[in-house]
Image: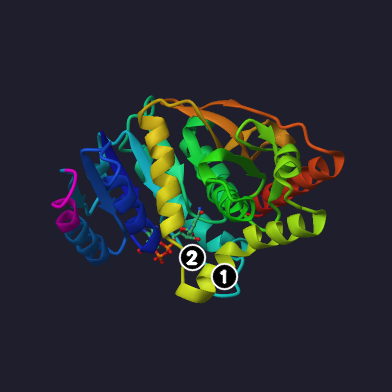
């Protein structure tokens, strides 16, 4: 399995590390418009690989060298500076995606390739990449709220005293400030969250849920304030998505992909079944009216930003 990573900055390098450590790929090619940075990353990662799985990691200076890649991960573009929102990156990163996708498509097998988008603002970049690539929408996938859902599960795990592995809880909508937590379908093991809390005598009132939602939405801002950027979480999320595709696992992940047509066309995160062909099915959670309205608002924000580019 050969994969290509386009953009080998903080995030691209973390993704390469996490992907290398899965042991599921035999070759990773790295492309960055800053060739010196890509070569340095390939050297460093290659040295690291000698301690683990035998993965060939090469920096490439042109897109022809990504030929044969089954999956292309796009992690290029401007990142948020402290205080910046993801949407602030819209114009800059639309130009980056517009530069990259046609070059990628000229060098991959369009019948087989899957493109994974990490660049922010994520959902709009997924829409743009899908439009430019003309691939089936299920094969242009953004990590979306996989990371936000992981942040939610981590906070809940500490609050409830159970492993993150036993918590099914989704963040839906935009990978951004308008995301929506689906509390109504959240579950611990096979128990509805409310039933679990009742049996365990744990109080999770609305005020606590609001605080949790705030922490989930602000996690990236806090991390950027503290360490300048975020990379470990997204690296692990991208590697997990890659594993799900490579192994045709049919897991339910909150990834972003384009659905709908015409004025209703939008990419946002919903629970989706993911396998070798990318997104295989999309599930529509039954939400209380206020959450359903918040999700519609989130979709509108994404669509408005897409229309603005
Ligand atoms: P970075 O500045 O460290 O690296 C970006 C890299 O992209 C640089 O090496 C740059 O040379 C390269 N690049 C820019 N334009 C390019 C082009 N046209 N072709 C090829 N390479 C190009 O930034 P970072 O911290 O690695 O963040 C990268 C992106 O990932 C940002 O948009 C950031 O917001 C996003 N991000 C997404 C998530 C998520 O959950 N989806 C999480 C963290 C960061």
Colour pattern: rainbow
In which quadrant will I find the C terminus?
Answer: bottom right
Q: Can the viewer see residue 136?
A: no
The total of numbered circles placed on residues is 2
- Sort mark 2 into few (<14), some (14-19) or many (20+) by Cα contacts within 10 Å: many
The location of residue 160, given as percent across then percent down, is: 63, 50
- Label 2 CB sits under 8 Å from any ligand 1 atom: yes
Pick out the residue farthest to the right. Answer: 289
Picture quarter containing residue 131?
A: top right
Picture quarter containing residue 208?
A: bottom right
- Label 1 CB sits under 8 Å from any ligand 1 atom: no
- Mark-to-mark CA distance, 2 and 1: 14 Å
For this view, does 260 lie left or right of residue 96?
A: right
To which residue does mark 1 refer?
222
In the image, ligand 1 is in what quadrant? bottom left
The location of residue 244, given as percent across then percent down, is: 42, 33
Residue displayed at 42% across by 46% down: 238
The location of residue 266, given as percent across then percent down, is: 66, 40
For this view, does 87 lie left or right of residue 202?
A: left
- Reply yes or no: does residue 52 show up in magenta: yes
Depth check: give the residue in front, 258 or 110: 258
Tag shown at residue 79: 2
- Reply yes or no: does residue 235 show up in magenta: no
Bounds of the magenta segment:
46-53
Q: Can the viewer see residue 13?
A: yes
**Residue 120 against residue 168 in the figure, above or below:** below
- The residue tagged with tag 1: helix, strand or loop? helix
């Amino acid at each position: 399995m050969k994969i290509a990573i386009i953009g080998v900055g903080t995030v691209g390098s973390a993704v390469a590390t996490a992907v290398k450590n899965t042991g599921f790929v035999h070759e990773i090619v790295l492309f960055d418009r800053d060739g010196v940075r890509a070569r340095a990353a390939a050297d460093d990662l290659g040295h690291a690989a000698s301690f683990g799985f035998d993965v060939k990691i090469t920096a490439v200076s042109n897109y022809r060298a990504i030929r044969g890649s089954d999956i292309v991960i796009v992690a290029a573009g401007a990142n948020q500076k402290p205080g910046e929102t993801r949407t602030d990156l819209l114009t800059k990163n639309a130009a980056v995606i517009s530069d990259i996708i046609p070059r990628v498509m000229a060098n991959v097998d369009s019948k087989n390739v899957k493109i994974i988008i990490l660049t922010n603002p994520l959902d709009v970049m997924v829409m743009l990449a899908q439009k430019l690539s003309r691939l089936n929408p299920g094969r242009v996938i953004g990590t979306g709220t996989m990371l936000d859902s992981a942040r939610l599960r981590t906070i809940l795990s500490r609050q409830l005293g159970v492993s993150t592995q036993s918590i099914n809880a989704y963040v839906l909508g935009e990978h951004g400030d308008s995301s929506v937590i689906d509390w109504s379908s959240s579950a611990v093991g096979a128990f509805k969250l409310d039933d679990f809390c009742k049996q365990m005598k744990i109080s999770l009132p609305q005020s606590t849920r609001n605080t949790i939602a705030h922490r989930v939405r602000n996690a990236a801002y806090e991390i950027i304030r503290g360490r300048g950027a975020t990379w470990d979480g997204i690296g692990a999320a991208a590697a997990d998505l890659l594993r799900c595709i490579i192994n045709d696992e049919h897991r339910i992940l909150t990834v972003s992909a384009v659905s709908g047509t015409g004025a209703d066309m939008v990419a946002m995160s919903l629970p989706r079944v993911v396998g070798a062909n990318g997104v295989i099915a999309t599930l529509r959670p039954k939400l209380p009216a206020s959450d359903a309205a918040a999700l519609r608002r989130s979709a509108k924000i994404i669509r408005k930003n897409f229309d603005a580019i």
